[in-house]
Image (cartoon, rainbow, N blue to C red):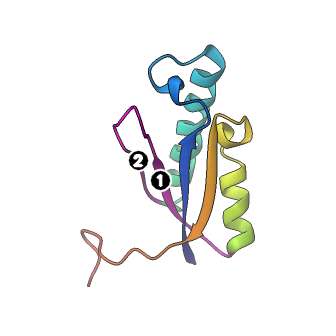
Amino acid sequence: MEEFAYLLEPTRPGMLVDPTDEERTAVRAHYDHLVRLLDDGRLMFAGRTLATDLSLGIVVFEADHEDAARRVMEGDPAVARGVFRAALHHYRVALLRGRPR
């Protein structure tokens, strides 16, 4: 398995403080997508910055190859619905609590 990250940025910055119903639904589906990845043992971690002026999210996960990783990213409902822009990158976790150095 290879490690990948996709970086997320809201397409409409105001959605963080005043989301539309559609954005709220997409973000809820995004969260459910991440929970499924976690339950499948593929998600390593996910989170976001708390700034409202420049919010960035990161999803770090494992996939067999880049095409599979791209499908995971493109299958994220908030990405597919255009609520977040996403960029995929190969990634290597260098240090992780509980993982041998």
Q: Residue at x 60, y 16 (%)?
A: 20
Q: Residue at x 58, y 78 (%)?
A: 1
- Residue 5 at what x, y percent from top left? 53, 63
Q: Are marks 2 and 1 in contact (CB under 8 Å)?
A: yes
Where is residue 6, by image quadrant? Answer: bottom right
Disc 1 target residue: 58
Q: Nearer the viewer, residue 62 or 91?
A: 91
- Sequence-wise, which precedes: disc 2 or disc 1? 2
- Residue 42 at what x, y percent from top left? 53, 62
- Direction from residue 54 to residue 83 in the image, left or right: right
Q: Which residues are magenta?
A: 44-65
Residue 75: numbered disc:
none
**Quadrant where the C terminus lies?**
bottom left
Q: Residue at x 66, y 54 (%)?
A: 73
Asked if the magenta segment contains residue 46, the reply would be yes
> Please, is residue 84 above or below residue 25 in the view?
below
Residue type at numbered disc 1: Ile
Q: How many marks?
A: 2
Q: Residue at x 44, y 40 (%)?
A: 55
Residue type at numbered disc 2: Gly
- Residue 45 at what x, y percent from top left? 41, 56
SS category of the residue bearing label 2: strand
**Dot 2 crowding, Cα within 10 Å, few <14, some 14–19, many 20+:** few
Where is residue 79, by image quadrant? Answer: top right
Disc 2 target residue: 47
